[in-house]
Image (cartoon, rainbow, N blue to C red):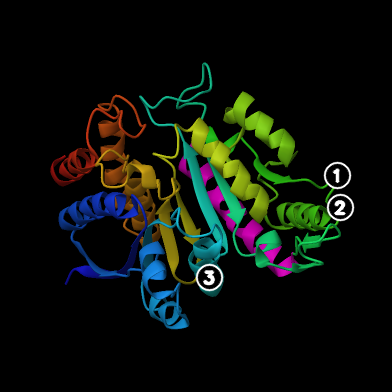
Amino acid sequence: MAKSYNIAIIPGDGTGPEVVAEGLKVLNAASARFGFRLDLVHFDFGAERYLKTGEILPDSAINDFRKFDSMFLGAIGHPDVKPGVLEAGILLKIRFSLDQYINLRPVKLYPNVDTPLKDKGPEHIDFVVIRENTGGIYTGHGGATRVGTIDEIATQLMVYDRRTVDRCLKYAFELKKKRNAMNSKYSGKPITLIHKRNVLTQCGDLWYRAFEEMGEQQYPDLKRDYNHVDAANMWFVKNPEWFDVAVTENLFGDIITDLGAMIQGGLGVAAGGNINPEGVSMFEPMGGSAPKYAGRNVINPMAAIGAGMMMLDALGETAAAQAVETAMTSVMQKMKSQAAGNMGYSTTEVGDLVANFVATV
């Protein structure tokens, strides 16, 4: 009997439904070829539902999501909704409620994909950023007083406990160990902690001490390095080949993974996962809802297809995931560009090409 997986689908806003459709097209091709079944359940949470009903994401939906094997998200965001309403009410609520404490962001340059970095190629840009995903400044500790006056005060605090730090570091060290065993090109590179411990002396010190202690006691054979976050931004651009696995806290990870997306060719190819290693994870393209491209069939679906590939790998369908990545690489080499409207193909044509490759090659 074929193995089956229950997948929750949130197409979301703007171009989200368009890229999700192409991602599902490829996932269905992979399931047919590799002999497993995907049982898909769609949810309409996003801007349209909020604007019509005022409902963002009820607690009952979180309970529903716990029953799934994984989640696949298109994008959240709409120009008619105040920034932060949907992001906090849907994205952060899912991450926190399902304890998706790892944000996994591969930064990989594929062949024939342009990078703004002169003289850098796929052999130079192939690393992973592990962003702690449920702590730090995003937890909302703080407040505001005297709002609207000249004496207004606002605070938002970076808060971390040792357990939250340790479990993120553990995931990063284990991934580094796995990558070293997978390919010798990774083994000569360190695992890199990124923070700002020269100024953020409390949280930075906690992260650094935990990193050093775990490395010394549990992973003595793995090389370790540390970068201040401002320096890491420079090195990502100047020497991306120095990095393999980088681990950091929530805010810094949010910032540097956007830089990572640009050096790998743009948001059209950047995918990520919100991971609970013991629970339900959610995979998504990084490009946002891009409402100006909605309905035009010009948006690049590669990031959504890549998110689907990551989901297959997390589910244990490694061969299917590898086939999808091989197909993505082949199709990218045929495309004129990864930029929306300049791909040489429509959104649906890119999805067709990748799906057909997965089904037949």
Residue 9 in the image: above or below residue 237: below
Q: Which amino acid type corresponds to the residue marked 3 in the rendered image?
A: Lys
Residue 116 is one of the magenta-drawn residues: no
Q: Is residue 296 left or right of residue 218?
A: left
Crowdedness of circle 1 by 10 Å Cα count: few (<14), some, many (20+)?
few
Instruction: Please give the residue where the numbered disc 2 appears in the rendered image.
Output: 201
Res 214 → quadrant: bottom right
> How far apart in space, not on screen, are marks 3 and 2 (Cα)?
29 Å
* Residue 34 x %, y %: 20, 55
Task: Report helix, strand or loop for mark 2.
Answer: loop
> How far apart in space, not on screen, are marks 2 and 1 (Cα)?
6 Å
Residue 173 is one of the magenta-drawn residues: yes
Residue depth check, mark 3 versus mark 2: number of the one nearer the observer:
3
Q: Which amino acid type corresponds to the residue marked 2 in the rendered image?
A: Thr
Q: Which amino acid type corresponds to the residue marked 1 in the rendered image?
A: Asn
Please report the residue visible at 50 percent of the width from the left and 71 percent of the height from the top: 278
* Residue 358 x %, y %: 20, 44
- Give the number of callouts: 3
Instruction: Please give the residue where the numbered disc 1 appears in the rendered image.
Output: 198
Res 250 → quadrant: bottom right
Please report the residue visible at 38 percent of the width from the left and 80 percent of the height from the top: 64
Instruction: Please give the residue where the numbered disc 3 appears in the rendered image.
Output: 93
Q: Which residues are magenta?
A: 160-183
* Residue 337 x %, y %: 33, 27
> How far apart in space, not on screen, are marks 1 and 3 (Cα)?
32 Å
Q: Earlier in the sequence, mark 1 or mark 3?
A: 3
Q: Is residue 247 visible?
A: no
